[in-house]
Image: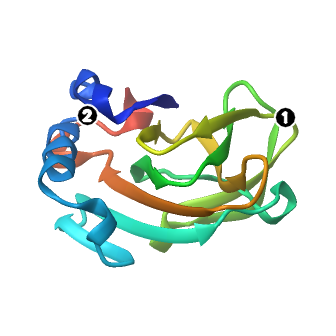
């Protein structure tokens, strides 16, 4: 997982070829005015999910992982604590098997690292990064968030699992 501030996003353009396009999209659009739900940017290669939700207590959240897409989760307003656990370094158990149509598998994780995201911060997650979004920080608040979903095997690039 990569966690940083939006002002530093250009430092990560070499991580994936679509990050340059994500950076341009952020610069050219008022993200708070995007409609709720999915907006395609480059078909199934790159799209954005606009979400507004109240943060939740930990017991109402779950860990998830993806295989086909990476996430760049950007908090626009509110404060959220995302749980993080590496598949390689933490004990985990699948609770809901992988569903390819939604590119999601759900997990139970014994221990994790809390990562606090405030407005203007982002987290980039790859298939090894189990993550628990929507968790409240100290108290519940309304979270405005954008999740860029970028295809890991974009235009013949090797998928994350093959690197």
Q: Is residue 41 above or below residue 39?
A: above
Mark 2 residue element:
loop
Name the image quarter holding residue 152.
top left
Task: Identify which residue is drawn at 66% across, 61% down.
Answer: 141
Q: Are marks 1 and 2 in contact (CB under 8 Å)?
A: no
Viewer-proximal residue, 132 or 27? 27
Q: Is residue 13 visible?
A: yes
Q: Of marks 1 and 2, which one's residue comes earlier in the chain?
A: 2
Rendered residue at 67%/44% (across/down): 81
* Label 2: how many Cα within 10 Å (few below 14, some 14–19, many 20+): some
Q: What is the number of the mark on residue 46? A: none
For residue 111, the mark is: 1
Q: Is residue 6 above or below residue 64?
A: above
CA gap between label 1 and label 2 equals: 29 Å
Q: Position of residue 22 (x, y in %)?
A: 21, 47
52 or 123: nearer the viewer:
52
User: In the displayed structure, does residue 137 sit left or right of residue 73?
Assistant: right
Which residue, given by chain and number where applicable, does mark 2 sit on?
16
The quarter in which the C terminus is drawn is top left
Residue 15 is at least partly visible in this image: no
Question: Around disc 1, counting alpha carbons within 10 Å, would you say few (fewer than 14), some (14 to 19), or many (20 or more)?
Answer: few
Q: Residue, x 82% and y 55% (percent of image)?
A: 58
Q: Is residue 30 above or below residue 102?
A: above
- Judged left or right of residue 159, residue 27 is left
């Amino acid at each position: 997982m990569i966690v940083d501030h939006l002002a530093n996003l250009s430092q990560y353009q070499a991580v994936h070829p679509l990050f340059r396009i994500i950076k341009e999209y952020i610069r050219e659009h008022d993200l708070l005015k995007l409609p709720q739900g999915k907006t395609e940017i480059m078909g199934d290669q790159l799209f954005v999910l606009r979400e507004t939700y109240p943060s939740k207590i930990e017991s109402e959240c779950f860990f998830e992982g993806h295989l086909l897409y990476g996430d760049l989760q950007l908090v626009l307003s509110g404060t959220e604590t995302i749980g993080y656990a590496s598949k390689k370094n933490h004990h985990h158990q699948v609770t809901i098997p992988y569903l390819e149509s939604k590119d999601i598998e759900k997990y139970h994780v014994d221990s994790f690292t809390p990562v606090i995201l405030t407005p203007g911060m982002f987290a980039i997650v790859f298939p090894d990064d189990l993550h628990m979004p929507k968790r409240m920080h100290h108290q519940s608040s309304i979270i405005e968030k954008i999740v860029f979903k970028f295809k890991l095997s974009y235009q013949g690039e090797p998928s994350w699992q093959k690197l």
